Image (tube, rainbow, N blue to C red):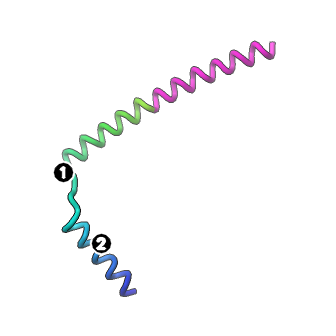
Amino acid sequence: MAGLINYLQESYNELKNHVTWTPLSEAQRLTVVVVVFTIIFSLAIWGVDTVFSRAIKAYFNLVGA
């Protein structure tokens, strides 16, 4: 148990004194950038998926007919 407490104390000390944290304003800006690119990328994947789905449906409608 003492090892766990020592580990937690050292971890807290490391995070508090030796880690350089990104300023809040920059973190918020980068979060917005990630959200925007995630939305754009998901819309692009949805578009490609829709095109391929329609192409496959059209192909099987021709082959089945």
Q: What's the magenta bit mostly, secondary-structure-wise?
A: helix
Residue name at image x 81 percent, y 12 percent: 65
Name of the residue lying farthest toward the bottom: 2
Q: Secondary structure at mark 1?
A: loop
Q: Which mark is residue 23?
A: 1
Residue name at image x 40 percent, y 29 percent: 40
Q: Is residue 63 magenta?
A: yes
Q: Secondary structure at mark 2?
A: helix
In this rendered view, identify the residue nearer to me: 15 or 39: 15
Residue 24 in the image: above or below residue 56? below
Amino acid type of the residue tagged 2 in the rendering: Ser
Category of crowding for the residue at label 1, using alpha-carbon neighbours closer than 10 angstroms: few (below 14), some (14–19), many (at least 20): few
Q: Is residue 24 magenta?
A: no
Q: Which mark is residue 11?
A: 2
Q: Which residues are magenta?
A: 42-65
Image-based side of 61 in relation to 6, left or right: right
Whole-percent x and y of residue 30? 27, 42
Residue 15 in the image: above or below residue 52? below
Which quarter shows the N terminus? bottom left
Amino acid type of the residue tagged 1 in the rendering: Pro
Whole-percent x and y of residue 9? 28, 77
Residue 24 in the image: above or below residue 59? below
Query: Disc 1 vs disc 2: Cβ atoms closer than 8 Å?
Result: no
Mark 1 or 2 closer to N-term?
Answer: 2
Residue 12 in the image: above or below residue 56? below
